[in-house]
Amino acid sequence: MKKLKFPTAQTILLIIAALVAGLTWLVPSGKFDTLTYNTSENTFTKTSLEETTTLPASQETLDALQIKIPLEKFTNGDIWKPIGIPNTYKEVEASPQGLAAFIQSPIKGIIEASDIIFLVLFIGGLIGVMNFTGAFDAGINWLAHALKGKEFLLIIIVTMLIAIGGTTFGLAEETIAFYPILIPIFLAANYDAMVALASIYIGSSIGTMCSTVNPFSVIIASDAAGINWTTGLTARFIILVIGTLICILYIIRYAQRVKKDPSKSIIFNQKESIENMFGNTTNATVVLSARLRLILFVFAMCFVVMIYGVSSEGWWFLEMTVVFLVGSIIIGLLGKIKESTFVDVFVKGASDLLGVALIIGIARGITVLMDDGQISDTMLYYASTATNGMNKGLFVNALLYIFGGLSFFIPSSSGMAVLTMPIISPLADGVGIGRDLVVNAYQYGMGLFAFINPTGLILASLAIVKVGYDKWLKFVTPLVIILTIFIMIALTIAVYI
């Protein structure tokens, strides 16, 4: 009898879509009145079932409508999507979604999320071109050999650099390529393979958990929540710095203990087999030439330009996608990649993220089903009723665990964002906290569980090193507890300042 495998994120989302289609036959249809800010006219538009009216863009208007959001959140562009007006829910004629609607929903979702999907695919193409040039490998190899004799610095810098990759462009799956490069170096330094695994995987996990400009999580989630992704950026950066420091200190403490006494290694009984597998590996040193340094610089500048454009020039998905396309072409020229080869590696890199793109589309399709069935506002209404009067600190920490639990079934950060944000983020308005805190709770909840999530990347990473899942849990559980306490304290403080 074959072992049953846990379904993929795409299948999970399709199952959820089927359940949502079924819910449209059971849950009453209903709508909230909505409020939209008009930038050109500096007015509000209130839309209800009966009429559409224009209202002054003032704090008095918001107070009269019982909307607990400061006026500047609208005028400075933080909230640019229509928001539901509290206490305006009304039941409407039922609009159940049948089999045809269910089958069409992923396609409709892909069409609606096309701007985000193209951004994801073009970033994949850029990463594919970067990998082909060898710039990533050269940079890591140069770093490893430059720090010979000061290996603890290797732990610090590798973890930091990968965390930076995680927080900026969602460096995760790509780290699989780093293990064969770094494990022999860590073994030669009298560390065990767990140190290399931790430096890479924990670096990626803390970076993506505390995403600052990551298009696959914070930008998509903020977009789905109806706020600008720069909202709450400073707080996320502070959490990133402190969280990364905690992780580095944790890894160094373990590494120094193993270096002093190898028998203290959690995987000491595998020492000989791992050394036979990696210890005699000789990696040809890839020289970090001036050309490769320039390529790494151009790669980094793509994100600098993106951040500047979005924060200062009003850019959005179209302009961001263009930045990564132009960056890919420049890197291709600098790397002297032939035209046909460039196209091949770019398409291959994009195809590597096609699964992510499909997840975004399928998840958006679920929102389409809920909107067409007019049950989104109904579920939001009952959820809002349940959270009325809830303590702010309790509310945001409850979300932390809700997102963590959901990530077992939907380990994709982008899929989780577009599925849950349109429903959960408005709850913040009723509780009286910023929607950016809901986005943060989503990131931290998913990120904390990612350290141990068996439906995520950890099992694939462990398979490379031949380390058992039980050994990893023994190593990382204390760190997860420490980070969870830290995040809960940080979220609680954030809702009261």
Image: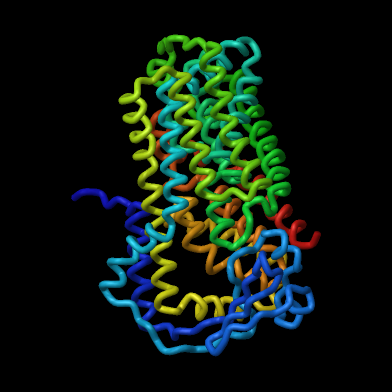
290 left or right, relative to 408: right
**Vertical side of 268 occupied by 43: above or below:** below
Residue 313 spot, x, y in % from top left: 65, 46
> Farthest left residue?
1
| Front residue (pair 493, 44) | 44
Picture quadrant where residue 151 is located: top right
Residue 379 appears in the figure: yes
| Front residue (pair 451, 121) | 121
Picture quadrant where residue 270 is located: top left
Q: Please, which colouring scheme is shown?
A: rainbow
Picture quadrant where residue 342 is located: top left
Q: Quadrant of the C terminus?
A: bottom right
| Residue in the image at 65% along x and 20% along y | 152
Residue 51 spot, x, y in % from top left: 57, 87
Residue 93 spot, x, y in % from top left: 42, 89
> Farthest right residue?
497
| Residue in the image at 58% along x and 52% along y | 443
| Front residue (pair 82, 171) | 82
26 left or right, relative to 484: left
**Vertical side of 169 occupied by 280: above or below:** above
